[in-house]
Amino acid sequence: MTDSPQPTVQLRNVSYRLPSGHEILRDLNLDAQCGEVLVLLGRSGSGKTTALKLVNRLREHSSGDISVDGRSTRDWNVIQLRRHIGYSIQEVGLFPHFTIERNIGLVPELENWPEDKIRARVDELVKLVGLSSDIGLRYPHQLSGGQRQRVGVARALAADPPILLMDEPFGALDPLTRADLQREFLSLQQKLKKTVLFVTHDLHEALLLGTRIALLDSGRLVSCSSPQEFLSSQEPLVKQYVEAFGAGDVLNRGRA
Amino acid sequence: MNFWTFISQNKVEIATLTGEHLWIVGISTLLAVAVGVPLGILITRKPALRKPVIAIANIIQTVPSLALFGFLLPAPWFGERAGRLAILALTLYALLPMIRNTYAGITGVDRAIVEAARGMGLTDWQLLYKVQLPLAASVILAGIRIAVVISIGLATIAAAIGAGGLGELIFRGLAMVNNAVILAGAIPAALMALLADVFIGWLEKRFAPTREA
């Protein structure tokens, strides 16, 4: 990632209200630096998913400013913005009528890459996310949940976007598969150094994957700190979260 | 005169009328698809139009068929020929299932799939033709199936305004109080409806989204 500008995401005093006036996010300030994994942690309804969707403009923020690579998201062409940002979600959302190959290769296809370059890229990604290369011609419903999620990550990486938005990507997996994918995510991230915004409600996952953890509650930012600081924080809501997970020893277990 | 002798003595006429019948139903179905599918797509994009569009299609559906033929008689160009008039009327009737199923098919596509597609940076047009329409295809085909089966039945009434088709035999049979003649019109029409139902039903299955590779 030597080319300027640095891939970063900034939220400045961002609020999001529904047309009904109900406020989902209030005065949110966040920074995701180049190459870091910023985890948005919070319980259901805390607004973490909404915050993610504001970044790639699946929702439009009501006030404040969001910038990606130093440019306000409103100044981006929305399609360009989204192709610049990989997006992976818990439900995966693979296209059931496309083979795995086409699912992964869709964005490059839309970007008019030559066919052999797409094929090479798909092969590379299939290997990168730990799938066997014969999977390309199968359809999503023929895959296990873990395989589908890997395909989802591969698809998000297809056009090599510098920024990734991940919304509980491992949330629906069984614990063993989840642990596998978390481990692989870490080693992948060491290689790729993407700027990642990662949403989860799982403190263990947050401590394991995050370089920093932003705790959201009822649409407000409670704290944003490194995993170590998070565990020792005196902030009542943070303590409450940590206690709920009984997470005193997680840090040592998680980060070898 | 029994049924089989009537059939064998009037093979050519029955074949011609069947052809007319197919023509009226076929053309009106094509027109209904050409108008109804875009309208169905439109109301998924402009939610404010959904109620008025569905309401109008609903109202058309409630007009008794004979009355609709009558209402359309003054229509320019269409009114000049009974065949055109019948096609217009059947097109209007077929609109509701087309619009409704297109709308239901598209809005029925898994929300996560649509969200993922948007998040990946598909334009609205790409989302429509690469994702939503293929995944809605079987529901849209179900709409076509309903429309065709209804049209085949309704087209028999078009004979009342002189548009031809198998209804000719049914009306003639009624006038002659001759069941064999009525059946010579009714049975081919019923068979046609049955075949269309089976064939489009087969297509529907082929286009169902989770087919085996």
Image (spheres, rainbow, N blue to C red):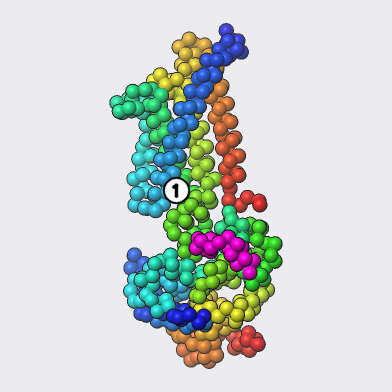
Residue at the spot of label 1: B103
**Whole-percent x, y for residue A81 in the image:** 43, 69
Q: Is residue A244 left or right of residue B37?
A: right
- In this rendered view, identify the residue nearer to me: B184 or B213: B213
Magenta part of the chain: A105-124
**Whole-percent x, y for residue B182 in the image:** 52, 16
Mark 1 belongs to chain: B
- In this rendered view, identify the residue nearer to me: A119 or A66: A119
**Whole-percent x, y for residue A16 in the image:** 37, 72
Name above or below for residue B68 compared with residue B56: above
**Whole-percent x, y for residue A226 in the image:** 52, 88
Residue at x 46% of width, y 36% of height: B30
Residue at x 65% of width, y 87% of height: A256
Residue B38 in sight: yes
Residue at x 47% of width, y 83% of height: A33
Name above or below for residue A127 compared with residue A195: above
Name above or below for residue A70 compared with residue A79: below
Q: How many marks?
A: 1
- Give the amino acid at mark 1: Tyr
Residue at x 49% of width, y 85% of height: A238
Q: Is residue A109 left or right of residue A129?
A: left
Tell me the element at label 1: helix
Q: Quadrant of the N terminus of chain B?
A: top right
- In this rendered view, identify the residue nearer to me: B209 or A41: B209
Residue farthest toward the top in the current orientation of the protein: B1
